[in-house]
Amino acid sequence: MTVSVNAGTNLNVFSTVAFMTPMENMSDRKSGEQTKVIGMALVTSACMYALIFSMLEGSSESSSNISQWHMAGVMTMPIIIIEIILMGGIYTNKKFNTVIVIISVVSFLAFYLVVKDQKHHLPRPLQGRSSSN
């Protein structure tokens, strides 16, 4: 619903942004940007975790463990970096963008190293045995 205040001015009655000063509007926009980036990271991480199970045959093969969360982190961090780089026009808070990219790069390296280290500690499949024994 819009209300005509002067001859050429329309205000959206349901929008509080119309009643804010430009500085209030900008600070709300930046905090909204930060919330969107963090929300996107959480949703993406949950989706990546769920996708790890997509290649399993049945529920009997699925057992959740911390390694899967680490792998979801490895997949999520580059998505966040790409989002910030490609959508820089949307996320205008350069300081926040820099912090998010640095955290994402460090997190990616940490998750990657943990996943690689865990591979060395997993039990090796039995070799030389046939399935008929």
Image (cartoon, grey):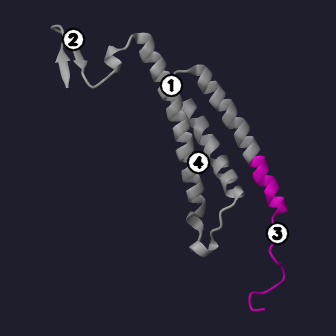
Q: Dot 2 surroundings within 10 Å: few (below 14), some, or many (20 or more)?
A: few
Q: Amino acid at mark 3?
A: Pro
Could you tell whether 81 is left or right of 67 in the image?
A: left
Which of 27/41 is in front? 27
Q: Calculate the distance from the C-alpha at mark 3 to the C-alpha at mark 1.
A: 46 Å
As helix, strand or loop, the secondary structure at mark 2 comes to loop
Q: Which label number is shown at residue 123?
A: 3
Q: Calculate the distance from the C-alpha at mark 4 to the C-alpha at mark 1.
A: 21 Å
As helix, strand or loop, the secondary structure at mark 4 comes to helix
N-terminal label among 4 and 1: 1
Query: For residue 122: magenta?
Result: yes
N-terminal label among 4 and 2: 2
Q: Residue at x 80, y 74 (%)?
A: 125
Q: Is residue 47 visible?
A: yes
Q: Position of residue 80 (x, y in %)?
A: 59, 38
Could you tell whether 22 is left or right of 3 in the image?
A: right
Q: Which residue is mark 2?
A: 9
Q: Residue at x 54, y 52 (%)?
A: 47
Q: Calculate the distance from the C-alpha at mark 1 to the C-alpha at mark 2.
A: 28 Å
Instruction: Identify the magenta region.
Output: 112-133
Q: Dot 4 surroundings within 10 Å: few (below 14), some, or many (20 or more)?
A: many
Q: Which label number is shown at residue 45?
A: 4
Query: For residue 120: magenta?
Result: yes
Nearer the camera: disc 4 or disc 1: 1
Q: Residue furthest left?
A: 7
Nearer the camera: disc 1 or disc 2: 1
Q: Which label number is shown at residue 31?
A: 1
